[in-house]
Amino acid sequence: MVQLLLPFRYLLYPNELFWTEEGYRFSWRVMLMEKMGQVQFKVVDSATGRARLVNNDEHLSVLQEKMLSTQPDMMVQFAHYLRDYYARQGVRRPRCTPTPT
C-alpha cells in the first residue's frame, strides 16, 4: 500500500509541484523531465572584501555538480560547506554566494 500511495503524496502539497518541487524527488513525475544548469560560487572574505571564484571540480564529483546546478536546496548545502571549508583555510567570516554564469 505504501509503494502505491507514496508517489501520489505530491497531491498533499498546496503549491504547484513543478514550481516549488515539494515532494518532487519521490513522485513518479521525476522521470518526466531532465533539468540542466550551471552554478558557480563566489567566496568573499568579509573582513577584507577579497573575493575568489570556487572551482566546483575541486569539491564535487561530476554527478554531484550536475545535481547541484538544478537543486536549490543542494546549493544552500554546498554554500554552507564552502563557508566552513574556507573558514578552516583562514578566510575570515566567509560569505558564499552563487554567481550568474
Image: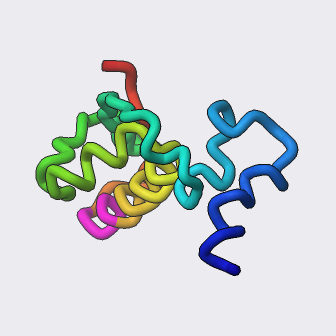
Residue at image position (30%, 69%) is: 88
Q: What residue appears at the point 30 percent right and 19 percent down from the top-left corner?
A: 101
Q: Name the residue: 16% across, 57% down.
A: 61
Range covered by the magenta-colored residues: 85-89
Locate residue 19: give its quadrant: top right
Residue ID at (20%, 56%): 60
The kind of secondary structure the magenta stretch mainly shows is helix
Seen from the viewer's position, the closer of residues 38 and 82 is: 38
Find residue 7 and report its horizontal and vertical position in percent: 63, 61
* Front-most of residues 33 and 63: 33
- Relative to 77, is 38 above or below? above
x and y percent of residue 99 in the render?
39, 26
Q: Is residue 44 left or right of residue 28?
A: left
**Residue 49 to residue 3: above or below:** above
Front position in the image: 68 or 54: 68
Residue 95 shows up from this direction:
no
Q: How many numbered discs?
A: 0
Display colour scheme? rainbow
Q: Position of residue 42 (x, y in %)?
A: 34, 36
Q: Is residue 77 visible?
A: yes
Q: Quadrant of the N terminus?
A: bottom right
Residue located farthest toward the bottom when viewing the structure as drawn? 1
Q: Residue furthest top?
A: 101
Whether residue 100 is situated above or below residue 97 in the rendered picture: above
Judge from the rendering whether residue 59 lies leftward or rightward of residue 85; answer left or right. left
Q: Is residue 57 found left or right of 5 in the rendered image? A: left
